[in-house]
Amino acid sequence: MTAITPEKQDSPHAQPAEPQAVPHRGWILTALMLTMSLAAMDITIVATVIPQIVGDLGGFDRFTWLFSIYLLAQTVTIPIYGKLADLYGRKPVLIGGSALFLLGSAACALAWGMIPLIVFRAIQGLGAGSIMATVNTLAGDLYSTRERARVQGWLSSVWGIAAIVGPTLGGAFAEYATWRWVFLINLPIGLAAIVLIARYLHEQAPARQHAIDYAGAILMMLTGAFGVFGLLQGGNAWGWLSAPSLATFALVAVLMIATVMRERRAAEPIMPGWVWRHRLMLGSNLGVLGMGLVMMAPGTYLPVFAQSVMGLGPISAGLVLASMSLGWVAASAWSGRLYLRFGFRDTALFGGVLILLAVLGFVWLPPQPASWLVTADQILLGAGFGMLSTPLLVGVQSVVPWHQRGVATSANMWSRYLGQSLGAAVVGTLFNNAMRDALDAAPAALDGALPGVNGAITALQTGPAASASRHYLLAAFDTATHQVYVGMIGIALLTLLAVLLMPRHID
């Protein structure tokens, strides 16, 4: 029987023993990659069939909630699943979360309207939170510090493959079958992963009674839910300084204070204070938060930039974005050699420098750049992400025992997704402000010929190719996208400062 035995240390400052050799690790890793693919492919495959979903179900004014509710449910549950994995073991949490994700997928495929589909997407997101919290934790349980970089390279490759396979499958389903298959395809993949985990993964979780912090879990979910909701709606549904926005963030502040007070009193807190007091963990969590912010710049605007400014087709634009995964996977796998020699902090700093160089490189690109230049810049950016994220994740896993690894890993993953939620708000504000300034400064000859900010992308795709208004919009879109990356320079610098909070060596 394969067994993962909890170590005996009680302090997150103690070095836990390396895991023993585990039979069938190859099958377990295959199951983890299949499970990760469910979450990795979800956004890209659903995005390609939105026109078909809206055409069938209606609700165009609500379709953005298909993504928002999924992200919201996933983000707020990651810390809770991480704590449950420490209390009761990774296996039941991962199988239960995967089953919930598949239940949501099946329900989405049967949805009869936009509102039910949004509700079922929330169920999917609740399951995805379990996947993100436990897959990387299990990798830390099964593999030694020396091996984890290679394993993280394999897990990172899932995201790169999903970036290509997701849109391709989604397009095929939309053209030759029905949009409902983007959800049904999850069922055989998820069932295969569950069977492999049930068959090959055996662990010995702590056999003692636990006092689950239900009040802390509820407060944390409410804090995260309203916080992410405010970030997603700010600048879109309402202005940042409007009454709804101020009321939402005031409520978040009250809930945050209540959560901290509750967690300090709880016997087994969902998010214990040592996660933020430990220098390595604090620097690591802030570092991946900054990385999540930077990730949203290419993820949000690069495909549209490639199609509108560079003149590429949808598939070519998707491949430009997917090229980031090439650098990510290679750097993640290679980082193991570096952090074993130079330490987690210095390796992550090198990754942060690569991110800064890639952001600066995009800012310095000429107008309407060649596709190979943007692709090379994306590969460099991906290399920075891989060289930063893997040492930070492996670092936090290396200083905690088994019964704290779920919390430590989920705090790291939660910080990254919180960064992406913040990033969606930041890059949207930077882009919209720059685009609005450019449209306001348009020559008088173009008065009445230019759309507003919200109609700019549609006008670029459908307007006359040789019109003066389209040429001006191209230049404005180019400028606005560059302004987003100018803002990311500051975020990249703050990310480097966050990593510097980490100790250079682990005692």
Image (tube, grey):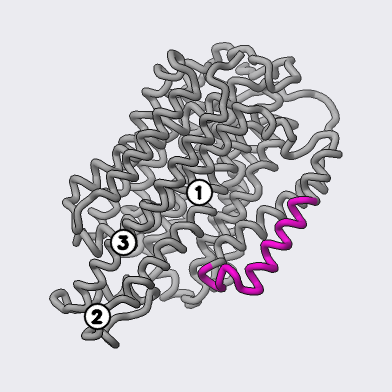
Tag 3 residue = 304
Extreme residue toward the left, this view: 466
- Nearer to the camera, 391 or 106: 391
| In this rendering, the label closer to the viewer, 3 or 1 | 3
Where is residue 289 shown, x and y percent of the image? 53, 43
Extreme residue toward the bottom, this view: 448
Kindly report the distance in space between the C-alpha atoms of the residues bearing marks 1 and 2.
Answer: 55 Å
Tag 3's secondary structure? Answer: helix
- Residue at 51% x, 32% y: name it: 499
Tag 2 residue = 443
Q: Amino acid at mark 3?
A: Val
Tag 2's secondary structure? Answer: loop
Tag 1 residue = 187
Query: Which portion, as a residue range, is magenta?
Result: 235-257
Q: Work out whether 409 lies above or below 430.
A: above
Left or right, 219 with reference to 209: left
